[in-house]
Image (tube, rainbow, N blue to C red):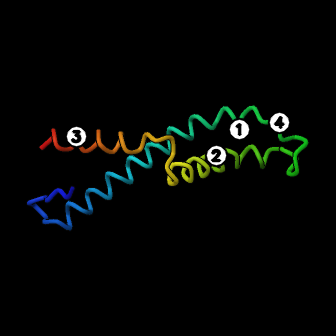
Amino acid sequence: MMRVDMSGGPQAAQDQDGRVRRAAEDFTAVALNELLKPMFDTADTANGPFGGGAAEEAFKPMIVNEIAKQIAHKGGLGIEEPVYQQMLRLQEARR
C-alpha cells in the first residue's frame, strides 16, 4: 500500500516510510540490546581465548549493541512490523 503525501508527492511519502521503518528497526535493536546485556554480563570470559580483562569489559557494550543491530536487521524478535504499524497509526493520528 502506497501512501501519498500531498505536501511532497510520492517520493516524499516513500522517504518518510523508509524513515519510519528504520526507526522501528532501531527500536527493535534497542530492545534486543537490553535483552542481551544480562547474558553477556554473566558470561565468564576470564578463561576464554581473549582472557577477559579491562579492554574486553570496555568493548563489551559495543559488541552487544552490534549483535543486537544485526539480529534486528535480520528480522529480530518479530516485533518490528507491529512497532512499524503502530508508528504509522500514531503518525496518521497527528495529521
Q: Which residue is drawn at 50% across and 54% down?
A: 73
Instruction: Answer left or right for 8 relative to 60.
Output: left
Residue 63 in the image, given as x and y percentages of width and height: 66, 50
Q: How crowded is mark 2: few (under 14 residues within 10 Å), some or many (20 or more)?
A: some
Identify the mark nearer the N-term, 4 or 3.
4
Amino acid type shown at disc 1: Phe
Observer-side mark, 4 or 3, equals: 3
Q: How far apart are marks 4 and 2 (CA)?
A: 15 Å
Kind of element beneath mark 1: helix
Q: Name the residue under label 2.
A: 64
Residue that mark 1 sits on: 40
Q: Check residue 44 in the rendering and tell me which mark sits there, or answer none.
A: 4
Amino acid under disc 2: Val
Q: What element carries label 2?
A: helix
> Would you say 6 lies left or right of 74 here?
left
Q: Quadrant of residue 16?
A: bottom left
Q: Residue furthest left?
A: 6
Residues at marks 4 and 1, CA–CA distance in whole angstroms:
9 Å
Q: In this rendering, would 63 be left or right of 77?
A: right
Q: Quadrant of the C terminus?
A: top left
Please name the amino acid that badge 3 sits on. Answer: Arg
**Of callouts 4 and 2, which one flags the residue occurring earlier in the amino acid sequence?**
4
* Residue placed under numbered mark 3 in the picture: 89
Task: Give the residue displayed 32% in from the left and 58% down from the top.
Answer: 18
> Dot 3 lies on which element?
helix
- Residue at 69% x, 34% y is 39
Contact? badges 1 and 3 (CB < 8 Å): no
Where is residue 89? Give x, y as percent. 22, 40
| Type of the residue with mark 4 | Asp
User: Can you say whether 46 is above or below 71 in the image?
Assistant: above
**In-front residue for pair 53/24:** 24
